[in-house]
Image: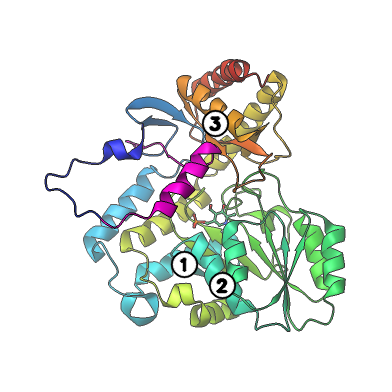
Amino acid sequence: MSWRKHQQPIDTAPVMAREHRWMAERYEELVAGGLNWDPPTLESANEPECTVDGQQMIMLSANNYLNLTTHPKVMSAMIEATQKYGAGSGSVRAISGTMDIHLAAEEAVARFKGVEASLIYSAGYTANVGLIPTLVQGKQDVIISDELNHGSIIDGVRLTKAQRAVYPHNDMGGLEQALKDHADADRKLIITDGVFSMDGDICPLDEITELAEAHDAMILVDDCHGEGVMGEKGAGIVDHFGLQGRVDFEVGSFSKALGVQGGILAGSAQMRTHALNHSRSWLLSGSQPPGVAAAQKAAVEVLMDEPQHHARLWSNTNRFRAEMNSLGFDLGVSTTPIIPVMCGDSRLAKDLVSALRDEGIVAGAIVFPMVARDAARVRNQLSAGLTDQQLDSILAGYESAGRKVGLI
Ligand SMILES: Cc1ncc(COP(=O)(O)O)c(C=O)c1O
């Protein structure tokens, strides 16, 4: 069912805006190529048992890795803060929109990440887009970026005038060559995703750090899918590799394992002062609603106090991976709770998604331009909230849907 079916009928005739034929043509092209978006509509919380377009389904396509979206402590923190501080913050952070609960959330993040300081942005997207341009000056600098980095990094890099070098995915020879090619650059900034969101593999951050140190480069790692997931207790990719104090900037998100919304920057106190004085996305946009700030802090505390969610995420991940492998699915290069089923053709990925839908499972087709045209896949994301019975149903549903579309 399309989102349009959920819109209420309007009793007065809308004023018709001017029609742009080129938009219709562009959309028709997308539809013809199987590349248009028509997202399903959730009518419940985004948790493993959910209601999508009127049907009860199992969610296998959410960033809610630790199932914190509905954690009672997170929800009540949001409600209580809203009652005390109101629905909105009333200003940008820099003028009169910094509340004590924003600072408390930042302190909680710094404790959880084991760093000196943190700064919260309105989203992971705006953290990358706001921070990256503050780290370079112009043509005298270079940004060296993994070819599969997230679009928010690409957009942040586009906002700079620095030279750019892109190295083949996770190719340390390529990174070293780029560092040598730009040995004369004033500032060198290496940027990589920690966990790559489309393939579920991780970057070799230990080797990247060695190279950065040898070539006097800074490192920004996007840990959006690593927070709450990687590391012994979920502190992220830096913790996973034991690189505390050696990675300059960690960008993250509250909208994934932490189950809320908002962007994270973690690092030194100096970095925090620099970022808040120069990031346009932080300076020029209203601050997070008080309820969100309180929920952010509560989510971080739950993550630190209740390690069972992290453990359950990984036991679910390991079971799903092992049994999907036995069924004969191609899971690509994933080593994390992001586990794609590789399909190649975008139509095949969409057919698999609709066959899974018939089995009561929501999983997302990932097609061009999010991935290369011949690398379409169905992306599964495991959650600590999935019960053994739900996993049984998912695996049985995958077996039957996979046979129906001819993938296994
Ligand atoms: C690797 C990566 N970086 C950044 C973001 C943006 O995070 P947010 O949803 O908080 O804007 C995402 C989300 O899709 C992501 O996957």
Q: Residues within 10 Å of mark 1 (few under 14, many from 20)?
A: many
Quadrant where the C terminus lies?
top right
| Frontmost residue, 352 versus 359 | 352
| Element class at badge 3 | helix
| Element class at badge 2 | helix
Instruction: Report which residue position mark 3 lands on.
Output: 350
| CB-based contact (under 8 Å), mark 2 and mark 1 | yes
| Element class at badge 1 | strand
Magenta run includes residue 20: yes
Which residue is painted at 87% across and 59% down in the image? Answer: 173
Query: Which amino acid does the dot numbered 3 rest on?
Result: Lys
Taking 94 as reference, is 11 above or below it? Answer: above
Closer mark to the observer between disc 2 and disc 3: 3
Q: Which mark is on residue 131?
A: 2
First reached walking from the N terminus: tag 2 or tag 3 = 2
Q: Residues within 10 Å of mark 2 (few under 14, many from 20)?
A: many
Instruction: Report which residue position mark 1 lands on.
Output: 121
| Highlighted magenta segment, given as a residue range | 17-44
